[in-house]
Image (cartoon, coloured by chain):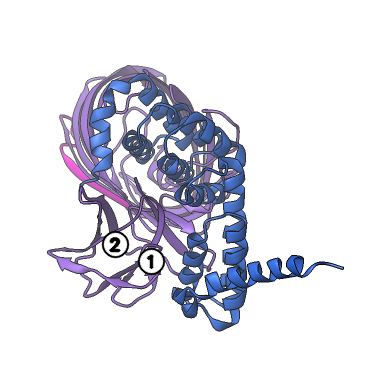
């Protein structure tokens, strides 16, 4: 048994960070330490302690990542799992096609009777646009359980769509491992709201094996406790991964994740650092330069009863926005340049809406920054 | 003994500069205990040839946010320093909007050398390149990688395409790429595919709802 990978994944879902180094290569490191309660199929529930380090080295043309998980259960039994993946990609594109080839190898070990290793290669063709895209891919390789290798093959296809702070993925893949075939259909969403990052996924597995079909789903939240630390809570159920040897389980986990060597930033695209004025409101600001020369500011806050905006283009006098359906709007004369602004909902604190760059504002709070070309 | 003319000129200059900021009715909104210091900083900046509107706006921002007078003065002084560094890097002909954008880029972590190189690389206005530079660093792109990417594009890329470039970087980061390589990849793509500029330009200039 080598499960608990979702506890590890939740701990690692902290984003990347820098260890330093100039140029285009970027090295990032994370480590997650957490406790979980895990209920593997065929076993009684158990508490577990997890330690999950990860290192990534990336360049525009590819990269190498290494992940590990150590689990210690109530019984004192231990599980160790690790994997290394290397990627090579064709010349990057802004829109259009991009191809990627990846090889991955890993192994896991639990007690004396369960040991897996695998080595697979994956080819993938992506069609990219700025806000949506799709991919198809094939995977081939081998996996071994107890010294008996089995061939692995898979076809996968998917699509993604994103807006500021939100990414949605839909995917389907058909896999064959030895004489077992199954199909996974999955959708996932990732959202950054203030200092909280949310991930959720639901899926269904259609299998020809004795296990039949099953549904699964997971959710996690990473709450920033500072620039390098986050609290991650998560739970749900995931299916067996016959390639890596991860056994299906239900789990709840809480972990502390640490980024390594992140340089201090005073401006943020998202998520936000801790700040008393910032709340995960989900309020979004869009800036639309108009042909007439004015700039239309649109705030998406359907639940609000009053929305005001203040910035260096209003002499920092609050300007009430007008409700237009689900949004609030104002058209203002704003000179080309980089501007600072905050939004206030229902007379509350001044916040930085999603969709603009966050910056520390000299006043113990934060301010939004946007450019008018 | 100094002549009456030598004495008179500085007095007139000081009087004129003090009244310039003090006569701006917006200064009355600034807390009384910091008003004189803010006026002095603004007039000093004006005397040094720096844009003063950003300084006034910074003071008004603090006022709206109910900051203490001491904090407002510190913020205005800090910004005046950043504007001065930006002017030194971008040169005297830089527009007030460029200096303001440059000050923000410096605050975000850009170096004065990067600003100076940007000025040499691009004849057009630097507002958008500086804003993109700030945004990249805000997205986690290391300062030197962000500078390299923007400098690679600055000479030949239109403002709208720079905005599209920044959107591409943001997308790749959202999809899981490390910020530094994402910026380098997008810069490489834009450098290699200038024919794509029209399509991207339209998208960048007119952000739309998802």
User: B104 or B166, which is in the foreground?
Assistant: B104
Measured from the top left, where is residue B67 in percent x and y? 52, 75
Question: Residue A145's spot in the image, x, y percent?
Answer: 38, 24
Give the structural element (helix, strand or loop) at label 1: strand
Along the line of sight, the residue nearer the viewer: B204 or A71: B204
- Give me the residue at 23% from left, 32% from top: A133
**Where does the N terminus of chain B fall, quadrant-wise?**
bottom right
Q: Alpha carbon of mark 2 to alpha carbon of mark 1: how far? A: 9 Å
Residue extending furthest toward the left: A325
Check residue A351 in the rendering and tell me which mark sits there, or answer none: 1
Find residue B32 and report its horizontal and vertical position in percent.
Answer: 55, 83
The chain carrying label 2 is A
Q: Dot 1: within a 10 Å radius of its alpha carbon, few (fewer than 14), some, or many (20 or more) residues?
A: many
Q: Are callouts 2 and 1 both on one chain?
A: yes
* Magenta range: A208-220
Residue B7 versus residue A292 in the image, above or below: below
Q: Which chain is purple?
A: A
Chain B appears in which tint?
Answer: blue
Disc number placed over residue B62 in the picture, else none? none
Left or right, A122 with respect to A256, comes to left
Image: A201 above or below B5: above
Q: In terms of depth relative to the viewer, which is nearer, A264 or A223?
A: A264
Decide which of tag 2 and tag 1 comes sooner along the chain.
2
Per the image, label 2 sits on a secondary structure element best described as loop
Q: Is residue A211 magenta?
A: yes
Residue contact at pointers 2 and 1, CB within 8 angstroms: yes
Q: Which mark is residue A283?
A: 2
Q: In the figure, B32 relative to B65: above or below?
A: below
Lateral position of residue A330 relative to residue B17, left or right: left
Residue A290's place in the image compared with B161, above or below, is below
């Amino acid at each position: 048994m080598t499960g608990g990978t979702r506890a590890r994944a939740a701990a690692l879902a902290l984003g990347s960070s820098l260890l330093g180094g100039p140029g285009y290569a970027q090295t990032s490191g994370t480590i997650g330490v957490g406790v979980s309660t895990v209920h593997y199929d065929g076993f009684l529930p158990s508490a577990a302690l997890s330690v999950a380090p990860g290192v990534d080295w990336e360049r525009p043309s590819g990269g190498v990542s290494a992940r590990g998980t150590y689990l210690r259960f109530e019984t004192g039994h231990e599980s160790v799992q690790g994997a290394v993946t290397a990627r090579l990609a064709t010349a990057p594109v802004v829109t259009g096609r991009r191809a990627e080839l990846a090889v991955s190898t890993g192994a896991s070990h639990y007690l004396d009777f369960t040991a897996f290793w695998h080595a697979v290669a994956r080819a993938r063709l992506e069609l990219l646009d700025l806000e949506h895209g799709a991919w198809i891919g094939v995977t081939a390789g081998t996996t071994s359980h107890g010294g008996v290798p089995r061939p692995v093959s898979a076809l996968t296809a998917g699509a993604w769509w994103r807006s500021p702070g939100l990414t949605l993925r839909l995917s389907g893949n058909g896999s064959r491992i030895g004489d077992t075939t199954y199909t996974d259909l999955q959708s996932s969403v990732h959202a950054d709201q203030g200092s909280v990052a949310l991930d959720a996924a639901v899926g269904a597995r259609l299998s020809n094996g004795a296990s039949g079909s099953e549904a699964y789903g997971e959710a996690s939240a990473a709450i920033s406790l500072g620039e390098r630390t986050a609290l991650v809570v998560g739970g749900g159920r995931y299916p067996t991964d016959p390639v890596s040897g991860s056994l299906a389980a239900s789990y709840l986990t809480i972990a502390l994740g640490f980024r390594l060597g992140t340089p201090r930033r005073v401006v943020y695209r998202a998520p936000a650092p801790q700040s008393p004025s910032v709340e995960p409101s989900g309020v979004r600001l869009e800036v639309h330069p108009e042909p007439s020369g004015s700039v239309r500011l649109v705030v998406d806050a359907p639940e609000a009863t009053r929305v005001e905006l203040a910035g260096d283009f209003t002499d920092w006098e609050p300007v009430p926005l007008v409700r237009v359906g689900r949004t609030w709007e104002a058209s203002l004369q704003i000179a080309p340049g980089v501007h600072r602004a905050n939004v206030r909902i229902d007379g509350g604190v001044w916040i930085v809406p999603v969709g603009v760059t966050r910056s520390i504002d000299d006043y113990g709070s934060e301010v939004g920054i946007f450019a008018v070309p | 003994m100094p002549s009456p003319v030598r004495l008179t000129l500085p007095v007139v200059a000081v009087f004129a500069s003090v009244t310039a900021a003090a006569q701006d009715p917006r200064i009355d909104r600034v807390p009384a205990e910091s008003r004189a210091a803010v006026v002095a900083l603004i007039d000093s900046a004006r005397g040094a040839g720096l844009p003063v509107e950003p300084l006034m706006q910074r003071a008004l921002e603090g006022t709206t946010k109910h900051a203490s007078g001491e904090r407002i003065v510190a913020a205005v002084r800090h910004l005046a320093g950043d504007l001065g560094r930006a002017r030194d890097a971008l040169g005297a002909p830089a527009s007030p909007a460029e200096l303001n954008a440059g000050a923000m880029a410096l605050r975000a972590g850009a170096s004065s050398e990067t600003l100076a190189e940007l000025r040499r690389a691009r004849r057009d206005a630097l507002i958008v390149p500086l804003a993109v530079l700030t945004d990249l660093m805000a997205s986690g792109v290391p300062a030197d990688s962000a500078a390299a990417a923007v400098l690679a594009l600055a000479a030949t890329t239109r403002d709208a395409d720079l905005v599209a470039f920044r959107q591409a970087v943001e997308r790749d980061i959202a999809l899981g790429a490390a910020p530094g390589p994402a910026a380098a990849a997008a810069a490489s793509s834009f450098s290699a595919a200038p024919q794509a500029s029209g399509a991207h330009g339209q998208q960048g200039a007119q952000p739309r709802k998802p």
